[in-house]
Image (tube, helix red, strand yellow):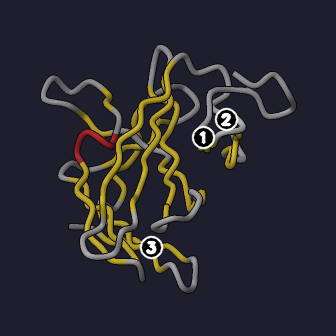
Amino acid sequence: MDRGKNPGLRLIAVHHDPNGEHIRFRSPFGGGDAYTANLTVFALPRSGSQVILVDFAAEFHYGTQVFFLREHGLPRLVGNIDGVALDDDDDAAAPSRYVSVLGTSAGFQLRFSRPLIRLDRNGLPGRARPTTYHYDIGTERWTQSGN
């Protein structure tokens, strides 16, 4: 846990060589006072690239950071998913439980099998959000659509 201006659990990449371990990457934003940071990693076929989802939570889901990692590169934070999915009991669940990832080194798609719900300031569910997110690596832009 980092105790600086931007505290919390975060994704780091550590390189090990004969001189010891060296931190090569630290995500720019921490998870605040989240108790857990769960990683889900998806390999993009034929590209050597990966998409990493980091779900932050304590008593409830705090949000999900999305990272892109090129083969032999360092992770890059490319966005956040600020929503939850509802599980079979209609309880809020991390969206990474319901995602499939497709793509290449040019871009990828996050497709959720359940609608994503954003909670308002009072903790009440809002409208369902689009459930497919497309990321173009060249333009570094997201587009969204419904299923």
Q: Position of residue 5 (x, y in %)?
A: 86, 32
Asked which secondary structure carries label 2, the reply is strand
Tell me whether circle 2 and circle 1 mark residues in contact (CB < 8 Å).
yes
Residue shown at 49%/53% (left/top)? 66
**Circles 2 and 3: CB distance less than 8 Å?**
no
* Badge 1 or badge 3: first in the primary sequence: 1
The span from disc 2 to disc 3 (Cα, nearest Å) is 32 Å
Report the residue marked by disc 3.
135
Nearer to us in this view, 58 or 21: 21
> Residue drawn at (51%, 65%), measured in percent from left and top?
72
Viewer-closest of 111 and 87: 111
Crowding at dot 1, Cα within 10 Å, few <14 / some 14-19 / many 20+, comes out as few
Left or right, residue 41 beside residue 147: right
Q: Is residue 102 left or right of residue 108?
A: left
Q: On the image, which quarter does residue 77 sit in?
A: bottom right
* Amino acid type of the residue that numbered disc 1 sits on in the rendered structure: His
The amino acid type found where label 3 is placed reads Tyr
* Marks 1, 3: nearer the viewer: 1
> Split into 4 quadrants, where in the image is the N terminus?
top right
Residue in the picture at 35% in, 48% down: 41
Q: Name the mark on residue 21.
A: 2
For residue 38, side relative to residue 63 (left or right): left
At 85% from the left edge and 28% from the top edge, which residue is drawn? Answer: 4
- Residue 136, above or below 90: below
Regarding mark 3 in the picture, which secondary structure is present there? strand
Measured in 3D between alpha carbons, the distance from the residue under mark 1 to the one under mark 3, in whole angstroms, is 31 Å
Residue 117, given in percent of the width and then of the height, sits at 37, 43
Query: Which badge, 2 or 3, comes first in the chain's sequence?
Result: 2
Query: Residue 7, position in %: x, y?
Result: 75, 28
Q: Which residue occupies the extreme right position in the image? A: 5
